[in-house]
Image: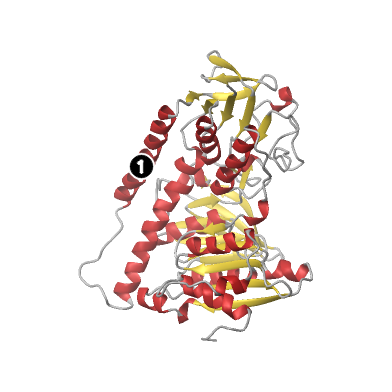
Amino acid sequence: MKHIAIIGSGPGGYYAALLLSKSGCKVTLIEKENIGGACLNVGCIPTKTLLDNTSLFEHFQFLANKKKIFSGEDIKIDTEALKLFQVEVMNQLRQGLEKLFKAKKIELVYGTASFLSKNKLRVTHSIEGNSFTDIEADEVIIATGSKPKNIPSFNLDGKLIVSSDNVWNIPSVPEKLLIIGSGPIGIEFARVFHVLGSKVTISEIKESLCPILDLEISENLSRSLKRRSIELKINRATKFLEKKDDSVKVEFISTTDSEREIRGYDQVLIAVGRKPNTENLSLENADIELEASGFIKVNKHLQTNIPNIWAIGDVTNYPQLAHTASFQARIVAKNIMGNLQEFDGRFIPGCIFGYPEVAFIGLTEEEAKEKSLNYKVGKSLYLASGKAKASGLTEGIAKIIMDTNTKKILGAHIIGAEASSLIHEMVVAMQNDLTVEQLTNSIHAHPTYSEVLLEALENTIGEAAHV
């Protein structure tokens, strides 16, 4: 029986543990803090609990104030009740994992793991380091995740200058909040704190909001945030000036003309991305190689340069998403069991949650232009959708980028209601080389938001009836 040691119990680690246990392996799962990793404890789950409920509240307010559908006494968000609901959701999921681990006979060991050799780990249980367990395994999977990046001069203190790990549980609602970084984390927290009552400013050093997005979708997102009175400072570098007991002074410097502006905020959220958790693993003891960027170097099978050591999730140089990690876990579990699989990182969907949602996969239009590809764009507005009209969620657009020669999809980009669910039709289509015509020949139910996507697909081949 193979013995597999897995470092980290996030979406990648725990999923690999379950799959390998099911395949007959002895599995030891090592966790530094809480099972479920950053996703369950400070990331995906608690933040989506906030986003889903604040988005629902925002939509209710719109229907009450603008459409006059609801009336009566003001309904407010009870922040304490929302926090309790967060904890309830997280506890239920943790308990579910604990039951699964017991049922599958997965050994769960708490502590900080480090390599002694390619087959041997030391798990330290105490801060002093005087309590530890040594574990020998045939194969080791590194799934230690990531942690927030910082900015030079902005020293995180967990109170006035914070990361996403500090504010997921709403310790306070600042009157004036500055968010540095406009990636998915920054956008999502901007939406949450705006609804909770903060005056939010987003600062982005690059020339467009959330630079990973297709520019047209980025512009739609910018308009959406501005309509909600969220201030955007694009092309702005930020410099820490001063911290007092209850405020932080920041200087904004234009990257185009060097114009300077000084502002004060009650809190600053650093949301400039995450970096891999590798520094305490003693990788050198197992001769594991890193990329120059700090990620663990893996081959197409997600194997490190040491054949019995694998890496998945945020420690690898792929989009740092929970579903990346869990899919990689499937690949590695199969590879360990001898069913050789390759990981294809081209078809990883990205999502930004809130109101409205954003989802995307594949090339942006800008990337298609840079590659000098022959392509055609098809679009459809939510405003023309019967479902969107009925729901009052008419904000948004679906955009498809099609290869003119093959009629296959190069990229898909959606901003609007249920975008995070709609994108999966595009994932399946792109991964299986389906053409736009094959998709448009599939019946899409009415009235649903999927019709917005269908019309965008039809538009790429000149068959959209409403355009």
Q: Residue at x 32, y 68 (%)?
A: 60
- Packing grade of label 1 (10 A; few <14, some 14-19, many >=20) is some
Residue wearing tag 1? 87
In the rendered image, is residue 262 in sight? no
Foreground of the two, 30 or 78: 30
Q: Quadrant of the C terminus?
A: bottom right
Q: Nearer the viewer, residue 13 or 307?
A: 307
Q: Quadrant of the N terminus?
A: top right
What kind of element bears circle 1?
helix
| Residue 457 locus on image (x, y percent) | 58, 75
Quick check: 52 above or below 86? Answer: below
Residue drawn at x 74%, y 36% is 290
- Residue 291: where, in percent of width, then height? 75, 40
Outermost residue toward the right in this view: 372
Relative to residue 93, is residue 438 depicted above or below? Answer: below
What amino acid type is highlighted by mark number 1? Answer: Val
Q: Nearer the viewer, residue 123 or 442?
A: 442
Q: Observer-nearest residue: 265 or 143?
A: 143
The answer to whether residue 124 is left or right of residue 363 is left
Q: Position of residue 267 (x, y in %)?
A: 49, 51
Question: Is residue 348 placed above or below 121 in the rendered structure?
Answer: below
Residue 133 visible? The answer is yes
Looking at the image, the residue that sits furthest to the left is: 72
